[in-house]
Image (cartoon, grey):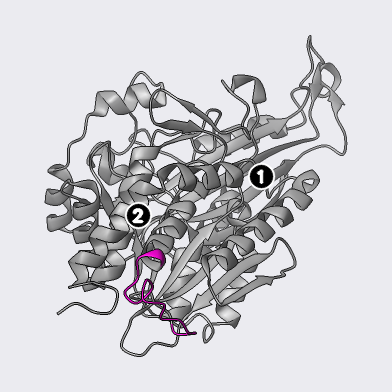
Amino acid sequence: MRNQAGFRNQTDWEERAGQWLRDHDSEIFAGLGRFLRLPSISTLPEHAQDVQATARFLAEELQRLGVPRVELIPTAGHPLVYGEWTGVSGRPTVLIYGHYDVQPVDPVDQWKSDPFTPTLKEGDRLYARGASDDKGPVWAHLAALQALLQTAPGRSAGIAGSESPLPINVKLLFEGEEEVSSKHLMEFVNQNAQQLSCDLIVISDTTLYAPGVPAVCYGLRGIVACQIDVFGPAHDLHSGTYGGVVANPVHELSRLLASFHDEQGRVNVDGFYEDVRPLSAAERRSWASLPFDPHALEQEAGVPALAGEPVYTPLERMWARPTLEVNGIWGGFQGSGTKTIIPASAHAKVTCRLVPDQDPVRVLDCLEAAVRQRLPATVRAQFTRMEGGRAWIADPGHPALQKAAAALRQGFGAEPVFIRMGGSIPVVSTFSQALQKPVVLMGFSLPNENFHAPNEHVHLDNLRAGMRTLVHYWLNL
């Protein structure tokens, strides 16, 4: 029996939604182009008004879709955009998260086209800042919802009302500070768990495993950061007069940083590995079966050979082993020519990627203790703690993740894989802990699409497949 709109079953709805996406392809990507033209660079104060304008643009898009409750929520930083269409019993409630802010575009001279003028090249590659991280995936979510709304049973029969015609209850939360640590979003989530209550959280700020290989991500590394400042004399000293009797802070900091790793690439800090959860044999077998070319990774990174702990494979090192990296080091004279001094100070920024069960505070405690123990009495140190977040891991056998894999299989026409990723999205663990619900990570970008770098781009066919995936997922939840 057909209903009033002429639908026989769920498959009928899915087919009509898919056809709507095909029929409105140019309209969908024209809208994405308008989104990408907005220079919402969250870290630069001169773009604060652009970030605000982008938040308003996104709120207006939700209203245009017909979402009955839309809010611009101010924070101490950039605003949150919230939308809600709920209230239908018996349907799962999904919280969809994404971010509308983007990274700076420097160095501009390395871009092949203007970063905020979306440019189609090489067939289906759309170049623009934010194309893959994260405006493109956010737009895919909005397009999938619009396709379902436009083809919903009862729509053509003139059925109206406040009740959502979607197959799910939906809450949408988009932030403008993901690229600057999500501090205010995490505060909002912890303070508004009731408003955000749901059955699952879906995020598309991850990637496919490889071209043609969609992925469900079930683990992310955490992160902590610090700055180490080493001070020697009260001011720069003449190296001829004082050389040999006054310790050089650059020398001492360099020795300290070099001591943080052994010759095998292991972190040489007492207690650093104490809480690391070991990889299971099943995971190691699963990852070993994935297509992986270490030489391709060398070429992608531009290095002559890969480094790291030799007892682990490159995927294991990237996804499930903690790291300590020196992100920057400076001190002393930096100009052309020479200036014969003993510098007064030297500085370094350090981050650690964390894996499940590692406590960010404890890791920094261990690192600070190593700094205090290893620097000689001839210099003094200042250890400044910065932002951090725990690693996150989920059960890949959870029904929500298994249904996500089925949706990816349908949308991409390829067998998906279950992976972890080496990056960090701190708000994922915040959602998981505050809302106590599963988080599903399925992205539609590729790892080599230059997000955070010049010439960021996205393959439009992957966004189209992502839209089909989401239509299938929402109907099958």
Residue 152 lies within the magenta run: yes
Residue at x-position 44% and y-position 88%: 87
Report the quarter where the C terminus lies: bottom left
What's under tag 2, amino acid-wise?
Trp
Per the image, label 1 sits on a secondary structure element best described as loop
**For residue 252, above or below residue 192:** above
Residue 116 falls in which quadrant of the image? Answer: top right
State which tag comes first along the sequence, 2 or 1: 2
Report the quarter where the N terminus lies: bottom left
**For residue 40, above or below residue 281:** above
Q: Magenta stretch?
A: 150-163
Say which mark, if any, is on residue 38.
1
**In 3D space, how far apart are the residues under numbered discs 2 and 1 (Cα atoms)?**
27 Å
Residue 307 in the image: x percent, y percent? 34, 31
Residue ranking furthest to the bottom? 89
Of residues 9 and 274, the one nearer the viewer is: 9
Residue at x-position 71% and y-position 34%: 249
Residue carrying label 2: 20
